Amino acid sequence: MTEDVPIRVMVVDDHPMWRDAVERDLQDAGFDVVGVAATGQEAIARFPAARPQVLVLDLQIPGPTGVEVTAEVLTHDPSARVLILSASGEQADVLAAVKAGATGYLVKSASRAELLDAVRRVAAGDTVFTPGLAGLVLGEFRRMAEGPDEAEEQLTPRETEILKMVAKGMSYKQIADRLVISHRTVQNHVQNTLRKLQMHNRVQLTRWAIAQGLDDDDGDGDEGA
């Protein structure tokens, strides 16, 4: 993502004042708001023409629900990112959204700065959760884990090390700083890992890593990049 190309965002919320406030905050911060919607049906109908990179989506909207919208738009465009912005921090809502493919989940008590940062990070491929929710999601996917996957053995020590950090929700920049390598090197390792595991995006990769319990390990290996 180049700095001079604004991130394309679509906002979906059935409360006009809240939707307008989020749209205004995004526009003021330099994002390109390419569409808004008040219902799930509107969101699904407008999504293909709007082509947002990030969908900022409320869960409690007139049907289809936010969870159903998430699954539908990602089927249409797997490269899109969905950031849930909801009043609910309930476990069932968070897990349903993540299982549908949401890349991030913020509660509406988040600050303007937290929202803008979350949109930027989600657009870059990071997973973002309101503090306190990340552990919930990690724990649930760990419980869902089946046996270890043979595919893990295809990875190099460095790829496995980076994958462990991805599973913990670390951004590419944080991983690069931790390992003293470049941001692009981190991206290259992640792309190689995606190819080896036959996955298409970081959301799938994170789910797989969590399912294998890789987020349990500190992954502080000293292998070279």
Image (cartoon, helix red, strand yellow):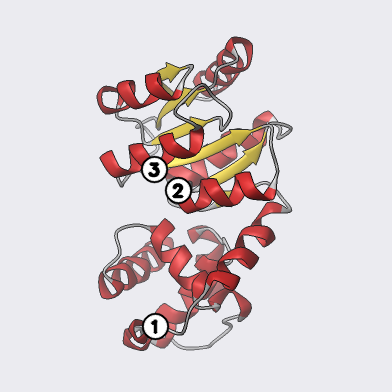
Residue 149 image label: 1
* Callouts 2 and 1 close, C-beta under 8 Å: no
Dot 1 falls on a residue whose secondary structure is loop
Q: CA distance from mark 3 to mark 2?
A: 5 Å
* Callouts 3 and 1 close, C-beta under 8 Å: no
Q: Sequence-wise, which precedes: disc 3 or disc 2? A: 3
Residue 214: percent from left, percent from top: 54, 78
In the rendered image, is residue 122 in sight?
A: yes
- For the residue pair 221 and 50, the one nearer the viewer reads as 50
Dot 3 falls on a residue whose secondary structure is helix
Q: Sequence-wise, which precedes: disc 3 or disc 1? A: 3
Q: Sequence-wise, which precedes: disc 2 or disc 1? A: 2
Circle 2 packing at 10 Å, graded few (<14), some (14-19), many (20+), is some
Q: Residue at x 59, y 43 (%)?
A: 105
Residue 71 image label: 3
Residue with the mark numbered 2: 100
* Callouts 3 and 2 close, C-beta under 8 Å: yes
Residue 147: percent from left, percent from top: 46, 84
Q: Is residue 121 above or below residue 168?
A: above
Q: Residue at x 34, y 43 (%)?
A: 74
Amino acid type of disc 2?
Ala
Numbered disc total:
3
Q: Is residue 121 left or right of residue 152?
A: right
Looking at the rendering, in which quadrant would you find the C terminus?
A: bottom left
Q: Is residue 185 left or right of residue 66?
A: left
- For the residue pair 106 and 29, the one nearer the viewer reads as 106
Q: Is residue 115 above or below residue 101?
A: above
